[in-house]
Image (cartoon, rainbow, N blue to C red):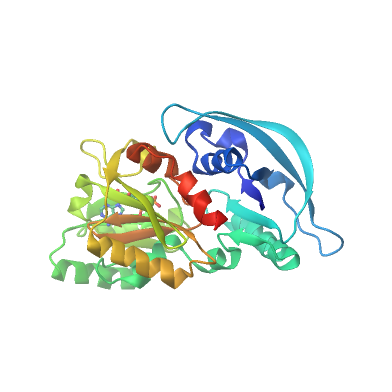
Amino acid sequence: MKTHVLLVDPLENLSVKKDTTLLLAATLQKLGHIVRLIFVKDFSYTNIGPSKLTTYSFVASFSKDVGYLESFSIDKKVDMELSKSIIFHFRVDPPFDTAYLRLLLILKGLKEKTGMRVINDPETLCSHNEKMIAYEFSKDLPSFVGSSQDNFNDFCKGLVRLGHDEMILKPLDLYQGIGVEKCTIEKASDLFLKKVAEFEGAIVAQPFIKEVVKGEKRAIYFAGEFIGAILKVPKKDDFLTNIAQGATFEACELTAKESFACQKITESLDIKKVPWVAFDLLGEIVQEANITCPGLLNEVSFAHGKNLAQEIVEILSE
Ligand SMILES: Nc1ncnc2c1ncn2[C@@H]1O[C@H](COP(=O)(O)OP(=O)(O)O)[C@@H](O)[C@H]1O
Ligand SMILES: [Mg+2]
């Protein structure tokens, strides 16, 4: 049996009872695997000598609400040498900034030095953006990424010709609905410049998709297999479907069009290198392919009455 090591944010930054990473760690341990956590502060690379890092063992208990934990706490400090027999899980939450890139580059060095398997592959994470993957895959949802006002104005003219009157402006590399704003296309120019200044460069522009009030789907895939999905529905009079912004959720299935798109993207990312992909789908179109630290496994498990981390562990053990 392999040892699993998970690189994680400090526990105090995580919502222990409903965190995807901790659910996976607790489930792996329950099923008999050796599991250790490494915190970002203890993460390092050296090109001389063995790759010995400080890791931690933990104790966890499951809630009677399927998919959630009751408790999670650190047990002991354990020195561990990274090697080929380890499966290493990169589970640090974005933002994808310079500090994040540094972690990925250290991890790439460790992977090449030790030959351990890393989920998801650091090089692929370095070279992909979760939103751009979706825009490059399909033209169904017009999307603009940049800071040029002339090009933005041309994009807006194209949207008006297509019959749109409202649009969304948002950061390319944030999360949880932070900085997402709706405006009329007519008045978008000023907001565009304000956002470019606020986010120090390229931002995303799209037409406002009215069906968002009915919800956005989250579909989790692992190694090309569909694990489960939920529909996230915004609060009344809101359009943000992020659960962190108060959206509710319920179990759902995917349409044939949705599952085709998700399958195609998982294949293009290479399921061996990037097995874990969590899609967001709006009006049957992929809006995001979350690969840096895919989440909402607790919610999808709860909605389906089944700890889906167990299915991921089974696939990992094959
Ligand atoms: N083009 C759009 N039309 C309607 N709603 C949108 C659009 N883009 C984003 N949203 C809403 O804003 C939320 C956050 O946007 P998203 O692109 O998913 O960024 P984040 O990475 O912050 O989750 C979405 O979940 C959705 O509710
Ligand atoms: Mg999103």
- Name the residue located 24 percent from the left edge and 64 percent from the top edge: 257
For the question of whether residue 148 can be seen, the reply is no
The answer to which image quadrant residue 203 occupies is bottom left
Q: Which residue lies at the image location 66% right of the left edge and 34% below the top edge?
A: 58
Residue 255 sits above or below residue 249 on the image: below
The answer to whether residue 7 shows anywhere in this view is: yes
Q: At which x and y percent is residue 99?
A: 63, 54
Where is residue 184 drawn, in percent x and y?
A: 20, 55
**Placement of the C terminus among the 4 image quadrants:** bottom right
- Residue sitting nearer the eye, 39 or 175: 39
Q: Position of residue 50 (x, y in %)?
A: 84, 58
Dividing the picture into quadrants, the one containing residue 78 is top right
Residue 296 quadrant: top left
Instruction: Please tell me which residue lies in front, 270 or 168.
Output: 270
Q: Going 24% across and 52% down the picture, which residue do you hit?
A: 183
Q: In the visual, does 298 lie left or right of 41?
A: left
Q: Nearer the viewer, residue 267 or 305?
A: 305
Q: Position of residue 68 (x, y in %)?
A: 46, 33
- The mark total stands at 0
Q: Residue furthest left?
A: 163
In this view, the residue farthest toward the right is 49
